[in-house]
Image (tube, helix red, strand yellow):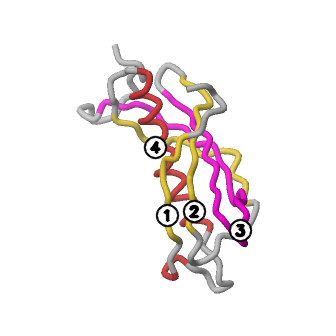
């Protein structure tokens, strides 16, 4: 997959339980879905590369930009693409889009970084993402 290819990691219908007092979806709800989509996208990239499937944990979110509000009833797509792979980490860009008034619009975007960890270690020490 080239750096400009996107992967549909998650698709969610926004529900009234996630609405703030302004009638839009809480930003924290979107951040939670970005974390989930980023992890799914990271696992997709690791599997596509043929590496072992390590446990990964979120360590950072960066460059989060909320472009437009998300509304109840929106069907929101979380598209991922690989930014970079380090020795123990993988960084994924997540684009959040929905169809609003007949147009696909970008709602939010962010970069999420995950680290491969050894779950058998009490300290969950980082391990090489490519295996080894």
Numbered tag placed on residue 39 in the rendering: 4
C-alpha separation, residue under disc 4 versus residue under disc 2? 17 Å
In the rendered image, residue 17, in percent from the top left (x then y), is placed at 48, 81
What secondary structure is marked by label 3?
loop
CB atoms of marks 1 and 2 within 8 Å: yes
Numbered tag placed on residue 76 in the rendering: 2
At a point 27% along the width and 31% down the height, the residue shown is 121
At a point 40% along the width and 37% down the height, the residue shown is 56
In the rendered image, residue 57, in percent from the top left (x then y), is placed at 42, 41
The disc, 4 or 2, on the residue closer to the chain's N-terminal end is 4
Q: Residues within 10 Å of mark 2 (few under 14, many from 20)?
A: many
Q: Which residue is mark 1?
A: 12
Image quarter hosting the C terminus? top left
Relative to 61, residue 70 above or below: below
Q: Residues within 10 Å of mark 4 (few under 14, many from 20)?
A: many
Q: Residue 54 is drawn in which quadrant?
A: top left
């Amino acid at each position: 997959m080239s750096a400009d290819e996107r992967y549909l990691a998650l698709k969610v219908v926004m529900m009234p339980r996630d609405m703030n007092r302004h009638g839009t979806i809480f930003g924290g709800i979107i951040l939670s879905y970005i974390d989930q989509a980023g992890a799914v996208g990271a696992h997709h990239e690791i599997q596509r590369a043929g590496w072992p499937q390590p446990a990964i944990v979120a360590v950072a979110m960066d460059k989060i930009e909320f472009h437009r509000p998300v509304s109840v009833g929106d069907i929101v797509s979380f598209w991922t693409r690989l930014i970079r792979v380090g020795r123990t980490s993988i960084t994924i860009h997540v684009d959040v889009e929905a169809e609003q008034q007949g147009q696909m619009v970008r709602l939010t975007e962010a970069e999420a970084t995950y680290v491969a960890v050894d779950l058998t270690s009490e300290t969950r020490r980082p391990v090489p993402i490519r295996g080894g």
